[in-house]
Amino acid sequence: MPVSLLLVDDHPIFRQGLRALLETESEFTIVGEAGDGLEAVRLIERLRPEVVVIDLMMPVLNGLEVTRQVCSLTRVVILSMHANEAYVVEALQNGAYAYILKDSTAADLVEAIHTVMLGRRYLSPPLSERAIEAYIQKTHSSTLDPFDTLTTREREVFHLVAQGYSNNEVSEQLSISSRTVEIHRANLMRKLKLHNQTDLIRYAIKRGIIQLEE
């Protein structure tokens, strides 16, 4: 049986290229595509692909948050332009099986998918496994990250608010009431010790959840 794949990227042209590349491999079958993180979570829960190939920086929910939510359902391969070790560490801590840089070759991606199907981790060659292992040990011994205390719904609200969604828009995206959004927002602000929208945006940039425009 071919390995079932779900492709997640917010650029349709990139997804089409990725699909064309992977469909040349007879052992793979593409079962779906998603253009944002929330859509990806819903498709993964419905389609149960064996492997998800997802961009790190995604609208609505980023690749790290999607990974955290679905790592018990599928094996996640993260594609990224960022070789920053902190991103790699967080991806692995959130349950990703592989972290591939976007300047890798097609053969690297195919190898990564085969590797994760064997239950092993795969990192692009420039990334230092030893440094990452040391970083993981260090973070495990440190105090609890306040962000890790947020519930899944609070994280979803955080991602959307950081991207500029209003309470009403968040409620529509998540199919919850505006009042519930307000409660989640107040809770996450308290847990993260943030006082206003400016604090929230700065925190989101610091965590790599959103990026400053070039």
Image (spheres, grey):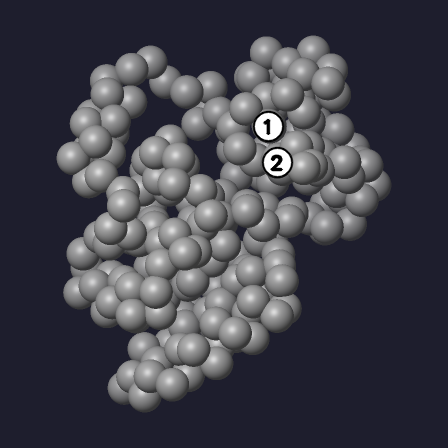
How far across and how far down the image is residue 126, in percent? Answer: 27, 45
Q: Which disc is residue 71 wearing?
A: none
Residue occupying the point 40% across, 77% down: 22
Judge from the rendering whether residue 112 lies leftward or rightward of residue 157; answer left or right.
left
Disc 2, disc 1: CB below 8 Å? yes
Check disc 1 and give the amino acid type.
Answer: Ile
How far across and how far down the image is residue 144, in percent? Answer: 37, 18
Check disc 2 and give the amino acid type.
Answer: Ile
Q: Is residue 180 visible?
A: no
In this view, 170 is above or below 146: below
* 10 Å crowding of disc 2: few (<14), some (14-19), many (20+): many
How far across and how far down the image is residue 125, in percent? Answer: 24, 50
How far across and how far down the image is residue 181, in percent? Answer: 73, 34
Residue occupying the point 52% across, 39% down: 152
Report the quarter where the C terminus lies: top right
Q: Using the rendered view, name the quadrant where residue 211 is placed.
A: top right
In this view, 182 is above or below 127: above
Q: Which disc is residue 205 wearing?
A: 1
